[in-house]
Image (cartoon, rainbow, N blue to C red):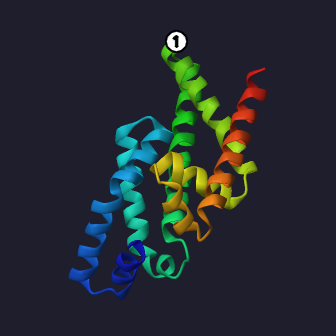
Amino acid sequence: MVEEYLKTIANGKNEEAEEALRMLYINYGSRILSYANRILNDRQCAEEVLNDILLKVWKKAKFLSSLDQPLAYITTMTYNLAIDYKRKKKEVIVDDINIYLNNEVTFEFEKTSSSLKLDRALEALTEIERTIIILKDGYDCTFYEIAEACKISYKQARNKYLKAFNFLKNSFEKWEK
């Protein structure tokens, strides 16, 4: 379905392309927004990420339509953009710590520290494991949907998810000690 929308957008016929982008937003916008909001814990920033992603999809539709897994690529773009927003927010928080040393700023700094640990742990995963974690936990996809999107079997999708999830869990347990 995503592939069809991307092909229509890539063909460049204005009304059809705009309608395809609108349908992409209707069918997948809430997933992208929800995933970005999980990373950012800020609905307004998540909405900005969603808008930026839709703009990138519009501009890169031809490239995206040529991919085997365009939804996984869009998910990765969402993750990267949300992390960029989070890093910018962290820079502001770190600068503000010198001015406002209160519990709220300290708490925000700690949340950002945890998300940086998550970033490091995710970077240690293979691309397919990262994609599966993002699709399962970020988009609430079923293992059947993940298997279809990644062009692997249901059993492989489930096993790779469990392996990656356990790795992330163990990584956080190590950092807590």
Placement of the N terminus among the 4 image quadrants: bottom left
Q: Quadrant of residue 46?
A: top left
**Front in this rendered view, residue 103 or 34:** 34
Q: Residue at x 72, y 47 (%)?
A: 163
Position of 141 with respect to 44 (left or right) is right
Question: Can you say whether 48 is above or below 92 in the image?
Answer: below
Q: Residue furthest top?
A: 102
Where does label 1 land, which residue?
103
Residue 27 horizontal/vertical position (percent) = 31, 62
Residue 35 horizontal/vertical position (percent) = 45, 47
Q: Residue at x 73, y 57 (%)?
A: 126
**Front in this rendered view, residue 76 or 42:** 76
Q: Residue at x 30, y 70 (%)?
A: 21
Question: Can you say whether 167 is above or below 132 in the image?
Answer: above
Identity, as a three-letter code, of the amino acid under mark 1: Asn
Residue 153 horizontal/vertical position (percent) = 62, 66
Q: Residue furthest left?
A: 15
Task: Say which element carries label 1.
Answer: helix
Q: Quadrant of residue 116?
A: top right
Placement of the C terminus among the 4 image quadrants: top right
